[in-house]
Amino acid sequence: MKRTSKLIYIVSIAILIIGLSFFGCKKQSNEILIGGVGPVTGEAATFGQSMKEGFELAIEEWNQNGGVLGKQIKFIYQDDKGDPTEAATVWTKLITQDKVVGIVGTAMSKCSLAGAPISQQNKVPMITPTSTNPKVTEVGDYIFRACFIDPFQGTVGAKFAYENLNARKAGVIFDVGNDYTKGLAEFFRDKFTELGGTVVAFEAHPTGTTDFKAQLTKIISNKPDVIYIPDYYNDAGLIAKQARELGFNGPLVGGDGWDSPDLFKIGGTAVENGFFTNHFSKDDPRPIVQEFVKKYQEKYNKVPDAFAALAYDSMYILLDAIKRAGSTDPEKIKQALMETNINVVSGLITFDKNRNPVKPAVIIAVKNGQQVYQATVNP
């Protein structure tokens, strides 16, 4: 009798374990796991926070409309701290431990270049919202982006300086330790020279420095009409202040790394008469843009920046591809991504053979401490 009771007890426990395992699997099967990566702390923390909000707003909308493939989307967001080593660590975790079917991230090119090989090796599709360095998608055929690339952005900046600002002499200062800033500086220099302008000084500074006066003194002594500053907002604000202190009153031009409210906190009035290339403007009159701005403001009580808009777009692009693929199989998602033709906040998106989007850019002017839409430049 005791043996029978013991056997019944063992069988009951086994059935319970199997049932719980089944329930767990069933529960997990009702979700599609998407990974996200961005710098919530570190030198570009505002970028990562904006991206997180854009991702979450998009997921909320999809889940309210039934999710994708009849399943709800579960989002796992990791902080890369703006550090490539940390990016590689969280990328690996999302793929090997969390088992995500796709990753949206990250902000900075140097961190995307650390994560992309891991996505490629594991065949997990990745879409970076804002990493503009051309090398990112060159990693492999599972790597996509939602933003235009540095050659286009640097070219647009140079054309704007030469044609709209009538600049003929330009000085350039950039962070030599950052692939993004170095790339933009080089593309600007090459295009500005091609147009007939002269780059009177091309000055690099070390990553992490706060005193740029040696480089700026050399630039300003050559009497440039414009100074091109492709650094992120934190450095750009300081450079602008020091340039003004040294007597330069001309226009300053930068890239999308300027797009942060902290630019004004750091640079103050020094960033007035500044212009930068960007992916999005809240003042763009297109209905899809104004609807996004309204929803974002209602949820977060602030105006979205380009990082929020591109994150929102990236999530839509990925989920739309999963929907069209009819599967979470990575090969099918990748193929669906290549066939993307979708109108999102930053414009109509299709991908070229290198998985870079064909889309327009906007020029933003800095006036009275505000971003003001200046123009749209098509590819």
Image (spheres, rainbow, N blue to C red):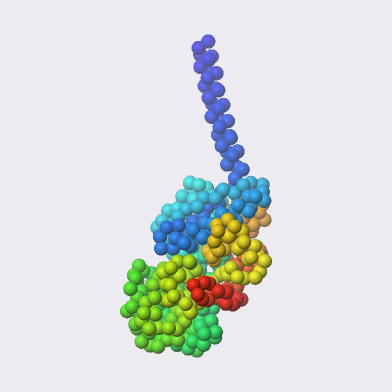
Quarter of the image for residue 104 reads bottom right
The percent position of residue 111, horizontal first and vertical second, equals 44, 61
Quarter of the image for residue 152 reads bottom right
| 325 w.r.t. 265: above or below | above
| 356 w.r.t. 90: above or below | below
The percent position of residue 361, horizontal first and vertical second, equals 57, 73
- Where, quadrant-wise, is the C terminus in this rendering? bottom right
Q: Which residue is situated farthest in the front direction here?
A: 368
Q: Which residue is situated farthest in the top direction here?
A: 1
The percent position of residue 213, horizontal first and vertical second, equals 33, 78
Q: Nearer the viewer, residue 373 or 164?
A: 373
The percent position of residue 342, horizontal first and vertical second, equals 66, 63
Q: Residue drawn 54% across and 26% down?
A: 14
Q: Residue drawn 41% across and 63% down?
A: 43
| 186 w.r.t. 65: above or below | below
Q: Nearer the viewer, residue 372 or 334?
A: 372
Q: Residue drawn 47% across and 62% down?
A: 46
Q: Residue drawn 62% across and 55% down?
A: 319
Q: Nearer the viewer, residue 21 or 49?
A: 49
